[in-house]
Amino acid sequence: MGEWAWNRETVPRVLEIVSSHLSQRDLCSVLLVNSWCYRALVSQPSLWKVLDFHEMSKAGERLISALSLHRYQYIERLNLEFARDIDDEHLLLIKSKVMKHLRYLEYLNLNGCQKISDRGIEAITISCPKLRIFSIYWNVRVSNLSIKYLVKHCKYIYDLNLSGCKSISDQSMCDIGDNYKELEQLNITRCIKITDDGLQHVLLKCIALRGLNLYALSSLTDRTYEKIGFLAQLEFLDLCGAQNLSDHGLSCIADCRNLVSLNLTWCVRVTDEGVIRIAEGCRSLEFLSLFGIVGVTDRCLEVLSPCCSSTLTTLDVNGCIGIKRRSRHDLLRLFPYLRCFKVHS
């Protein structure tokens, strides 16, 4: 009886535990060992919840083939980042043939899939009603129509990356603000059509935001930066290249008491006054970049030190010609836990 239990219960359980640490390719290789391994593994749904085709050729064909297999009917994560050849037709085929296998999908990465347009986004969003994390970095073909499809079919998004989607405009910001009140992460890097009007709509309605990436959105003004101060839970903020950010706007951002990471690289209008307000308000900072700001001096670091010396581990003041004491030794005297002194090269 002991040997029976060992063979029927213990061995399959051990195999499941070990297999859960294998890569997708290795896991599929184990299937080929023998029929017993095959049956033992395919009977464990927890092993088949991830499909990863990032940077693979013929990713569309591989995806269709995988989703046609019964074991992938409970998939939760799908990574197609920079997958070659994936296009609208593959996504339309998924919708028509194997849509039910994506009904539990929570994570979808389409970063760099530049052959996908609004047609493909409509098809894939219809197939993924439980989607929570969606990333489509560097796609200039998707437009505001894709966001309309997203908010219509995927009601539970809390993490959204639209970085580099240059056709996205204020209309999408309105749709996001109206439909994703629980949004926690938003990346709209280089979405250059977005203005103060659109982004303010998000900031006033998505007050649960914890991460906000506004990298290279140089046209925004203090009208937007004032509203960021309303985000009480904000922990990450990237304002690199915010050329219109003033000390007043930065003073409003200082109301984000939980801020941990703040990128002010090339925020050229900022002076000591704004950084001092950040020091006084954001006492949990671990990352701060002042790279390229010529209007700050040693004074702002002297005020920052007693406020954040126990937390700050990354500080970039390269190019801050007004800060005279910026050697590694000088900075460590003020911030003894620093480990990184250069964010930008």
Image: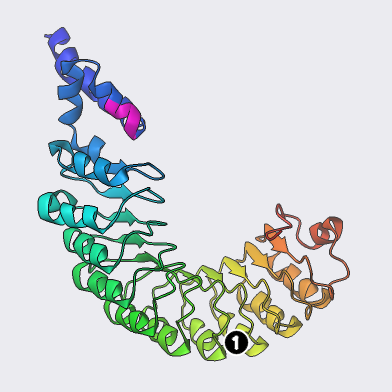
Tell me which corner region of the image, top left, top right, bottom left or bottom right, holds residue 170. Answer: bottom left
Residue 17 seen anywhere in this rendered image of the structure: no
Tell me which corner region of the image, top left, top right, bottom left or bottom right, holds residue 343. Answer: bottom right
- Which element is circle 1 on? helix
Residue extending farthest to the right is 324
In the picture provided, is 193 more to the left or to the right than 178?
right
Residue highlighted by disc 1: 249
* Prevailing SS of the magenta stretch: helix
Question: Relative to the observer, which residue lies in front, 305 or 121?
Answer: 121
Question: Relative to the observer, which residue lies in front, 334 or 339?
Answer: 339
Residue 87 seen anywhere in this rendered image of the structure: yes
> What span is colored magenta in the figure?
24-28
User: Where residue 162 sits in the image (x, y, percent)?
Assistant: 41, 68
Question: Relative to the observer, which residue lies in front, 325 or 213?
Answer: 213
Identify which residue is drawn at 75% across, 81% down: 272
Whether residue 67 appears in magenta in the rendering, the answer is no
User: Where residue 48 sits in the image (x, y, percent)?
Assistant: 23, 38
Q: Rate crowding at label 1 as few (under 14), some (14 to 19) or many (20 or more) other CA atoms within 10 Å.
A: many
User: Where residue 332 sits in the image (x, y, percent)?
Assistant: 80, 57
Q: In which quarter of the image is the C terminus?
A: bottom right
In this rendering, is residue 21 above or below 250? Answer: above
Q: In which quarter of the image is the N terminus?
A: top left
In the picture provided, is 127 more to the left or to the right than 147?
left
Disc 1 marks a residue whose amino acid type is Gly
